[in-house]
Amino acid sequence: MWQALFSLGWMNFRPSFEGYLFVGGASPSGASRYLQVFRNGAIEHVFTDESIEPPGANMRYVRMRVLEGSCRNALLAAIGSYRQLGVEPPVFVMYALCGVRGTVIDKPQHSMWQDGVLLPLNKDALVAQERLLESFDADVDALLHPMFDEVWNASGWSGSPSWDSSHKWLGG
């Protein structure tokens, strides 16, 4: 029943008050991510420190391209699980980065993007506008691309380098 979610490498699965809880990853402070499947069908996927790395003494980076790929894979797995469970669309997809004030979006490796000043994020929480997934056969990349563009825009970039102009996923 949960095969699509287990394909993401969750270490632990258990019932919870809200529904089912999947815990995965490891960090010095414990689990680095969890996925809560609520009784009403909502899914909350949370990443903690696996996406923020401190490469220098005074600056933290958000590894957005890694985070984008993880979120994309999680959404695809959630859609697979919804299908297995018989959940019917539509579903809302939401995305937020929390605790990121002062962090910098990592600069794309192969880009002709702006050189020079990296702009730290000036908000503690960046909450992308929610999107409606009306069909499980819809183009997931076209749904996610503008959501991640919003986060890149907050750091002064024109958009995410993980998608091309036709919303095709390029990888991260």
Image (tube, rainbow, N blue to C red):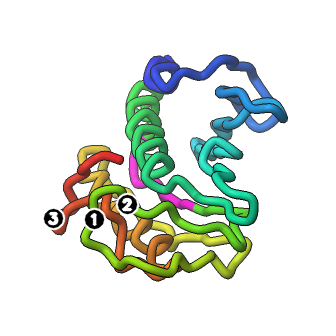
Q: Badges 2 and 1: C-beta atoms under 8 Å apart?
A: yes
Q: Badges 3 and 1: C-beta atoms under 8 Å apart?
A: no
Residue 65, position as x, y percentages in the image: 43, 52
| Rendered position, 120 above or below 45 | below
- Magenta includes 92? yes
- Magenta includes 129? no
Element under disc 3: loop
CA neighbours of label 3 inside 10 A, class few (<14), some (14 to 19), many (20+): few
- What residue type is disc 2 on? Pro
| Rendered position, 51 above or below 13 | below
Cα separation between marks 3 and 1: 18 Å
CA neighbours of label 2 inside 10 A, class few (<14), some (14 to 19), many (20+): some
**In the shown orientation, is residue 58 left or right of residue 161?**
right
Could you tell me which residue is drawn at 39 percent across and 31 percent down? Answer: 80
Select label 3 or label 1 by which is in front.
Answer: 1
Could you tell me which residue is drawn at 52 percent across and 76 percent down? Answer: 118
Element under disc 2: loop
Q: Earlier in the sequence, mark 3 or mark 2?
A: 2
Residue 49, position as x, y percentages in the image: 70, 45
Magenta span: predominant SS is strand
- Residue 111's disc number: 1
- What residue type is disc 3 on? Ser
Q: Badges 3 and 2: C-beta atoms under 8 Å apart?
A: no
Cα separation between marks 2 and 1: 6 Å
Could you tell me which residue is drawn at 74 percent across and 32 percent down? Answer: 27
**In the shown orientation, is residue 10 left or right of residue 89?**
right
- Residue 108's disc number: 2
Could you tell me which residue is drawn at 72 percent across and 72 percent down? Answer: 101
Q: Which residues are magenta?
A: 88-95
